[in-house]
Amino acid sequence: MRTRFFADLLTAARSDPNLVLITGDLGFGVVEPFVEACPAQFVNAGVAEQNMTGMAAGMAMAGAKVFTYSIANFPTMRCLEQIRNDVAYHGADVVIVGVGGGLAYGALGMSHHATEDIAVMRAIPGLAVVAPGDPEETGAVLMDLIERGGPAYLRLGKAGERSVHASRPDVARGQAVTLRNGTDVALVSTGAMLPVVVDAADDLDQLGISSTVVSSPWIAPFDESTVRRLASTHRLMVTVEEHSITGGLGGAAAEVLAESGSACPLMRIGVSHKFNSVVGDQGYLREVHGLTRQSISKRVVKRLEDI
């Protein structure tokens, strides 16, 4: 996802001199081509994310289209006040890009685990929140963010996620994407969990359980109509996210189902609502938190048996 983001951002920057990238003194392995091609459109703000965000808001209100970039927890948690007061309140054309959402920086410990960022960002009025599921969705949502502008938060994976879509899907802002249709369970994913969810659906199909797979890159605005439709046509809805089960995709789906009076059971699969004291690479931490294809399919089977 990260590679696709920078390739497409550079293409856009070459034709739009008002597009600016600001980084928090990291990511130079992927940032350097942008710097070399568009040096006047790049700023390294240093390890000063509050300043980076305030600078971005000021530049946007002067006519720039600004992207800020850092490891996911730093451009969100560290400068929440600036995002709320400077960017969102003023409707500034700023896209906050968080790379390595979830447990991608697992070995660096909980300070680098971005597991509450979606919940925090979706609580801010007027701030779009989007977490594409593969490189093709990344290109689609980035096109929207460039054309329609911010304020927005874009959450990216960084682990060389495989493409699930054969080509760039048509992803309108606020809409989910259905990858396959089934009748028993609706698997709704956001962010980099999409390939894992597709694999889990394959396993369930082998067990005779028919699965619908939906990618929900947009968390704000959220595709409430798709959630209601899935609830009315399936025995079980399951949300899967590399994020706390509190306040993210699962929370958004729960809000919709509660207010619609749906009788469809909802199972939220994600990171437990507690600080993570375990370290290790992303694959290991996904196993710890039950975010593997085997764990997801096993939990779905057990829940369907209990319904």
Image (tube, rainbow, N blue to C red):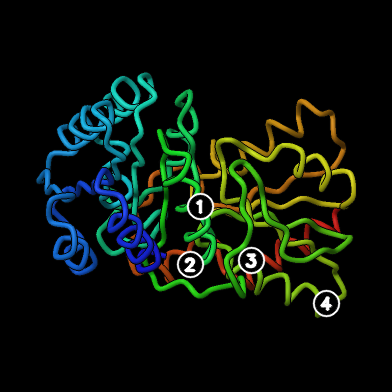
Q: Secondary structure at mark 4?
A: loop
Q: Of callouts 4 and 2, which one flags the residue occurring earlier in the amino acid sequence?
A: 2
Could you tell me which secondary element the residue under label 2 belongs to? helix
Whole-percent x, y for residue 58 in the image: 21, 27
Q: Which marked residue is nearer to the observer: mark 4 or mark 2? A: 2
Dot 3 or dot 2, earlier in sequence? 2
What crowding class fits label 2: few (fewer than 14 Cα within 10 Å), some (14-19), or many (20 or more)?
many
> Which-is-in-front pick, marks 3 and 2?
2
57 versus 22 height, above or below: above
**Amino acid of disc 4:** Leu
Would residue 48 be found to the left or right of residue 177 on screen? left
Q: Position of residue 214 (x, y in %)?
A: 70, 57
State yes or no: discs 4 and 2 in contact (Cβ < 8 Å).
no
N-terminal of the pair, mark 1 or mark 3, is 1
Mark pair 1, 3: CA separation: 20 Å
Count of marks, rendered view? 4
Estimate the x, y position of residue 103 in percent, counting from the top left: 39, 58
Residue at image mark 4? 207
In percent of the image, x 18 and y 58: which residue is there? 38
User: Residue under circle 2?
Assistant: 135
Give the alpha-carbon distance from disc 4 to disc 2, as whole Å: 29 Å
Rendered residue at 71%/67% (across/down) = 298
Question: In this rendering, which labeled residue sits more in front, label 1 or label 3?
Answer: 1
Q: Residue at x 64, y 66 (%)?
A: 197
Q: Which residue in the protein does label 3 denote?
A: 197
